[in-house]
Image (spheres, rainbow, N blue to C red):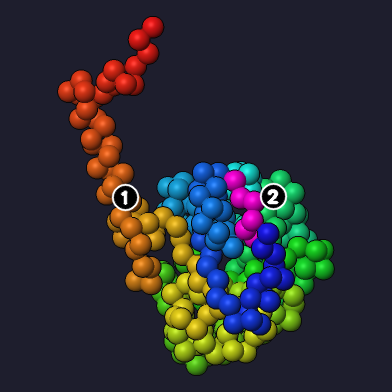
Amino acid sequence: MTTAPDLIRFKAEGRRFAVLTAYDYPTAVILDRAEIPVLLVGDSVANTVLGYPTTLQVTLEEMVQHCRAVSRGSRNALLVGDLPFGTYEASPEQALVSAARLLREGGVHAVKLEGGLSQIQTVRRLTQAGIPVMGHLGLTPQSVHQFGGYKVQGRDAKSQAEILEGAGELEAAGAFSIVLEAVPAPLAESVTRALRIPTIGIGAGPACDGQVLVLHDMLGIPERVPRFVKRYGELGSEIERLARQYASEVADGTFPGPEHSYPK
């Protein structure tokens, strides 16, 4: 099974690794078969699966439920659960209580939280308690209203310096990896070179040690995706096609046929 220290070893060996989101049992089973080493039960479940407008609405109880489902289906991946908005910002102790629930009840192996310098004491408290922490810098979706939308971060000297400093402080506080989201590729490369722990890019260019995508985005289930997403399939339109075929066969009486029925 992949562990948090394994990712640091992957970086030292120059081994790039893939990360995908998972929100339910069947997806976890499939991605386990695909040998994806890290599964992120992201708070992106809010708008991807639950229909919320942003990630801000998902609760800790909902995250625990989705983490638990993924943990039932995964046997080999490192499972990382997002700490949702409002469950860790008040104090390191609040974060510890929330993170402990994701590990104890949700079955994940590590937690992810957003923020740099403001979260250093929290990261230190969690790691001292034996909870591996993945950081998250750049475009942090829980701060969407502060940013004024989903915008690329780190384009000016001040914000670049803040991201670089935040990354170094997160590493010093004990984080085992850092997600870099929607930052210029040269900045992500500078951060990656400066750290002993791996960076995981999403819209951060090719120099990061790992890459993460939202599974539904790469499979083509939503109609619109960010620029940085490569669509590896068009499952949304394929699901629609198959559903229409099924409905048509029910309407014209060709389903169910004799092979789908019990004669006695």
Kindly state the secondary structure of the residue where label 2 is placed.
loop
- Residue at numbered disc 1: 236
User: Which quarter of the picture shows residue 170?
Assistant: bottom right
Residue at image x 65%, y 72%?
7
- Viewer-closest of 17 and 229: 17
Q: Is residue 224 above or below residue 261?
A: below
- The part of the chain drawn in magenta is 73-78
**Residue 10: x and y, percent?**
63, 76
Amino acid type of the residue that numbered disc 1 sits on in the rendered structure = Gly
Residue 128: within the magenta? Answer: no
Residue drawn at 58 percent across, 85 percent down: 192
Location of residue 175 with respect to 163 vertically, above or below = above
Q: Main secondary structure of the magenta part?
A: loop
Residue 176 position in % (x across, y down): 69, 73
The residue beneath circle 2 is 107
Q: Where is residue 218 in the image (x, y as percent from the top left)?
A: 39, 61
Q: Which residue lies furthest to the bottom in this view?
A: 157
Distance between the alpha carbons at the discs numbered 1 and 2: 30 Å
| Dot 2 alpha-carbon crowd within 10 angstroms: few under 14, some 14 to 19, many 20 or more | many
The mark that comes first in sequence, 1 or 2, is 2
